[in-house]
Amino acid sequence: MSKIQIWHNPRCSKSRNALHFLEEEGVDVEVVKYLDTPHSKEEIKNLISMLGLNSARDLMRTKEEVYKTLNLKNIEDEEKLIEAMVENPRLIERPIVIKDAKAAIGRPIEKIIDLVRG
């Protein structure tokens, strides 16, 4: 099986559950603590493409305080939304699992199960 990467936040129960699932599956997993290791605009653009999302907003945690503080609800410019995630990685939905140039957001975890086993 190919190496699988998880964008992980250890403080998030959904992220911990996803990592536990990957470990139980016995996969070779690379854990990326994305809050400690910010990603570039290009990496986020690639991720949006791998996820098959229509907008950068679909990757965002819209209930985060920083989302409200930055008034991102009223921003339509995709580049600005991506820049906001680069500067504030807390905005990125979690957990995200990447396998073979495909990705899934683990909400619900079944999306990750389908990606890993599919």
Image (tube, helix red, strand yellow):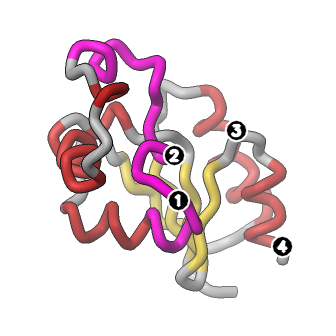
Figure quadrant of the N terminus: bottom right
According to the image, label 4 marks what residue? 117
x and y percentages locating residue 30 in the rendered image: 47, 65
| Marked residue nearer the N-terminal end (3 or 4) | 3
Tag 3: amino acid: Asn
According to the image, label 2 marks what residue? 58
| Marked residue nearer the N-terminal end (1 or 3) | 3
- What residue is shown at x 83% (from left), y 65% (from top)? 114
According to the image, label 1 marks what residue? 54
Label 4 to label 1, Cα distance in Å? 25 Å
Question: Is 64 rendered above or below residue 110?
Answer: above
| Marked residue nearer the N-terminal end (4 or 1) | 1
According to the image, label 3 marks what residue? 17
Label 1 to label 3, Cα distance in Å? 27 Å
x and y percentages locating residue 3 in the rendered image: 56, 79
Instruction: Please indicate whether residue 45 sits to the left or right of residue 41 in the image.
Output: right
- What residue is shown at x 54% (from left), y 27% (from top)? 12
Q: Which is closer to the viewer, label 2 or label 1?
A: 1
User: Is 62 in front, or is 39?
Assistant: 62
Count of labels shown?
Answer: 4
- What residue is shown at x 52% (from left), y 41% (from top)? 94
Tags 2 and 1 touching, CB below 8 Å: yes
Instruction: Identify the magenta region.
Output: 48-69
Tag 4: amino acid: Arg
